[in-house]
Amino acid sequence: MGVSSLISALLGNMLPGPGTLYRSQSLSFARRVHVGDKLTVEVTCREKRDLPVAALATIVRNGAGEAVCEGEAIVEAPQTTSRRPIATCRRSSSITPTILRD
């Protein structure tokens, strides 16, 4: 379940950000993850529901780009913006949060 904590950290700190209420998360684990593996968390907004609720697709990929965990998160986005800087994960030197923007 350590992999799922990366999703929670991303949702609570970056997307949508501080103040996010995590309502639910469904997960499906496809591959093993080992200590030292480099992982990338991808979050995509699938559906905007009645404000402030959103359904998000979540995928965690290993260094080879293979999906190790997939699911859906239902969150309640904060209604106000935060003026504090975006937090970074410092739990391990092998975890580096990355935000991909188009």
Image (tube, rainbow, N blue to C red):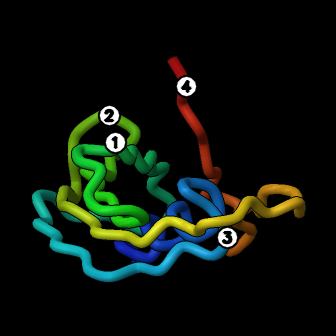
Residue 25 shows in this picture? yes
Kind of residue sitting beneath label 1: Thr
Q: CA distance from mark 1 to mark 2?
A: 20 Å
Q: Residue furthest right?
A: 84
Residue at (64% x, 51% y) in the render:
96
Which residue is label 4 attached to? 101
Q: Measuring from the top left, give residue 33's x and y in whole percent.
A: 31, 64
Q: CA distance from mark 4 to mark 2?
A: 20 Å
Which residue is label 3 attached to? 18
Q: CA distance from mark 4 to mark 3?
A: 19 Å
Q: Measuring from the top left, give residue 5's x and y in whole percent.
A: 44, 76
Q: Measuring from the top left, give residue 13's x and y in whole percent.
A: 65, 65
- Does 26 appear above or below 36? below
Q: Pointers 2 and 3 in contact (CB under 8 A)?
A: no
- Does 44 appear above or below 86? above
Residue at (70% x, 64% y) in the render:
80
Residue 11 lies left or right of residue 30; in this view the side is right
